[in-house]
Image: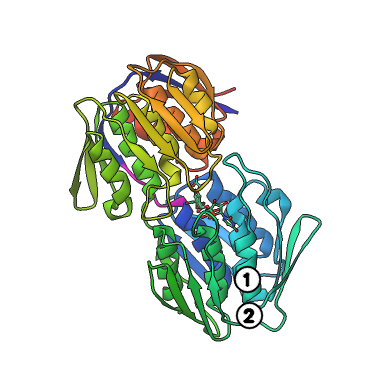
Amino acid sequence: MDVFHITGPVQLKGTVKVNGSKNAALPIMAAAILAEGISELNNVPNLSDISVCAELLETLGCKVTRDGNDQVTVDSSVIDNPVGDYEIVRKMRASICILGPLLARCGKARVSMPGGCAIGYRPVDIHLMGLHELGAEIKIENGYIVAEAPKGLIGREIFLGGPFGSTVLGTANVLMAATLAKGITVIESAACEPEITDLVQCLKKMGAKIKGTGSPRLVIKGVRSLKPFEYSVIPDRIEAGTFMAAATITSGELKIENCRLEDLMAVVDKLRNIGVIVEKYNGGCVVSRTGALKTSQITTQPYPGFPTDLQAQFMALLSLAEGNSIIIEKIFPDRFMHVAELNRMAANLYKEGSTIIVSGVKKLIAAPVMASDLRASAALVLAAMAAAGTSTINRVYHIDRGYERIEERLNPVGAKITRENI
Ligand code: EPU
């Protein structure tokens, strides 16, 4: 198991490049199921979650290859085992997004029901309701979702909103299934995240008929068949936001290449309000800070609101602001595993329900800490770069799920991170 030793405080200066989006790539890889033939996806990050997705597609019957760079090829000519095995789904919840495409292509699917998760209760009831509305019969058997639509799927008007707003992968599942359903499907309260818009663009390239791209109302006219795609995924907005937070927490200056600021408006707005300079140039931005950090109030929301996937990183940041900040988590009310770990680094965080009061401290102090999930571990890396002394972060595999060799990208701009296999 790998650990990070991170020595701080450092000041990051230089250029970093954002990779392709993991959360866009995963559902698009699943979309390859919808068409027979060879699909080619570019700008795919080299992450463990992508390898798990490739493994999953291979168990279905696909052949998946990755070149030495950022291209993944999925040959879905044959799908003869429409089963999402527990051993794979338990490693990655996003595996659930094969359910809709398998139903549409094979008329049946058996996918392990995702289990518990470090960021809290994550049901899939809305996915199942949406697919049921399209005509699938669904039951839970021995821990598996067993779905069947022997006569094919039929377009319907479906409301996909839940208690916490729209669902990203739920929208992906129902949308993909609807592309091959008979008639017209209307998805109301569709997720508007850029990753969903990217999926829509790819599906359109495959021949799907979809209106309302980027809006909460998607209208899909089912077609008989789709063709394989050649597509390039968008840059990862969460990685870009993490780099912005890295420049800020280290009082540094980073030129962030391959970053779409239009996907990060809520984040840029918060950064500017707390005293950070964000300058746009064609293809990226420059983020710098010279003065003290001001406090903020952050409420996570579905896109275009502030993303839950940057909540932990901004908590690390606001730990060093002068005064009290408030962070309210409205997507995953229990996504706070990082709170106790940040407090071990001398942050002053007080939790009340889904709200965290962040009382700014003058400095953070290095400590051994435990990564619990992907974004929580990113927050610990940020805090450790700002903290005095050497911190050790355990369970680095969490960060490897979503950030490709982060130490090799941050060390050239001034970080002091070493990876050790223990
Ligand atoms: N929800 C339900 N029922 C459902 C589905 C969702 O109640 O059937 C609830 C969830 O419990 C949550 C809210 O709806 O309260 C939103 O969850 P959503 O379904 O949108 O999350 P997801 O699709 O499972 C994706 C990302 C997450 C990201 C969330 C929210 C991928 C692979 N995952 O998850 O990314 O936090 O959207 O934006 O795209 C990460 O990258 O670290 C990560 C966790």
Tell me the number on the disc at residue 36: none
User: Looking at the image, which is closer to me, 336 or 417?
Assistant: 336
Would residue 78 be found to the left or right of residue 186 on screen? right
Mark 1, residue position: 131
Gap in Å between the C-alphas at discs 2 and 1?
A: 8 Å
Predominant SS of the magenta segment: loop
Residue 265: where, in percent of width, then height?
A: 29, 51
The residue at 55%/85% (across/down) is 224
Residue 40 in the image: state x and y as whole percent: 46, 65
Badge 1: residue crowd in 10 Å (few <14, some 14–19, many ≥20) = many
Instruction: Tell me the residue at 29%/32% (across/down).
Output: 247
Q: Residue at x 72, y 80 (%)?
A: 150
Range of residues picked out in magenta? 17-22
Instruction: State the image coordinates of residue 371 (x, y, percent, origin top left).
Output: 54, 30
Q: Amino acid at mark 1?
A: Leu
Mark 2 and 1 residues: CB-CB less than 8 Å, in contact? yes
Q: Amino acid at mark 2?
A: Leu
Residue 153 - label: 2
